[in-house]
Image: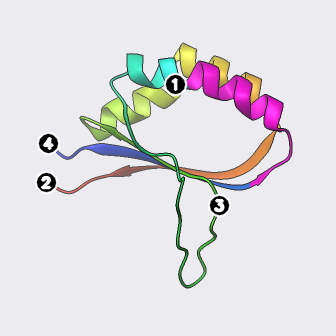
């Protein structure tokens, strides 16, 4: 079964305090849903049209698990805390077997 991944690229961070509140809630929510953080974007080299901004990569055991984690009550609370504090590109993608 293919794994599922959250890929999130932060284009702008307008409110670091909202982002910090989100991080405090999102981390436990992701771990409770079976997610494993692979990258928090400490070092980035961007190519082509890429941007060298905070990039998060989280792995789940399946695509369905990744979708369910995004929809979970705990993660929804984290999104409320984040609100308009950032502009980001958030995707859930299916891996290959």
Distance from disc 1 to disc 4, alpha carbons, whole Å, reads 25 Å
Counting residues from the N terminus, which is met first, the one under dot 1 or under dot 4?
A: 4
Magenta range? 12-26
Counting residues from the N terminus, which is met first, the one under dot 2 or under dot 1?
A: 1
Distance from disc 2 to disc 1, alpha carbons, whole Å, reads 26 Å
Position in image of residue 38 (x %, y %): 37, 44
Counting residues from the N terminus, which is met first, the one under dot 4 or under dot 3?
A: 4
Q: Name the dominant secondary structure of the magenta segment.
A: helix
In this view, the residue in front, 75 or 54, is 54
Distance from disc 2 to disc 3, alpha carbons, whole Å, reads 29 Å
Q: Give me the disc on residue 52.
A: none
Question: Is residue 83 shown to the viewer in this render?
Answer: no
Q: Give the residue pinned by disc 3.
A: 53
Counting residues from the N terminus, which is met first, the one under dot 2 or under dot 4?
A: 4
In this view, the residue in front, 48 or 83, is 48
Q: Give me the disc on residue 27.
A: 1
**Residue at left 32%, top 43%?**
4
Counting residues from the N terminus, which is met first, the one under dot 2 or under dot 3?
A: 3
Q: Badge 2, how many Cα within 10 Å: few under 14, some, many 20+? A: few
Position in image of residue 31 (x %, y %): 40, 22
Q: Give the residue pinned by disc 2.
A: 97
What is the tally of numbered marks visible in this picture? 4
**Residue at left 52%, top 72%?**
45
Distance from disc 3 to disc 1, alpha carbons, whole Å, reads 19 Å
Position in image of residue 19 (x %, y %): 73, 34
Q: Give me the disc on residue 1.
A: 4
Distance from disc 4 to disc 3, alpha carbons, whole Å, reads 31 Å
Disc 1 secondary structure class: helix
Question: Is residue 28 shown to the viewer in this render?
Answer: yes
């Amino acid at each position: 079964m293919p794994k599922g991944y959250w890929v999130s690229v932060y284009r702008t961070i307008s409110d670091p305090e909202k982002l910090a509140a989100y991080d405090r809630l999102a981390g436990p929510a992701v771990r409770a849903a079976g997610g494993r953080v692979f990258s928090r974007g400490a070092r980035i080299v961007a190519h082509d049209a890429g941007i060298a901004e905070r990039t998060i990569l989280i792995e789940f055991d399946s695509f369905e698990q990744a979708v369910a984690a995004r929809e979970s009550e705990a993660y929804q609370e984290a999104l409320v805390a984040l609100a308009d504090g950032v502009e980001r590109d958030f995707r859930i993608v299916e891996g290959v077997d």
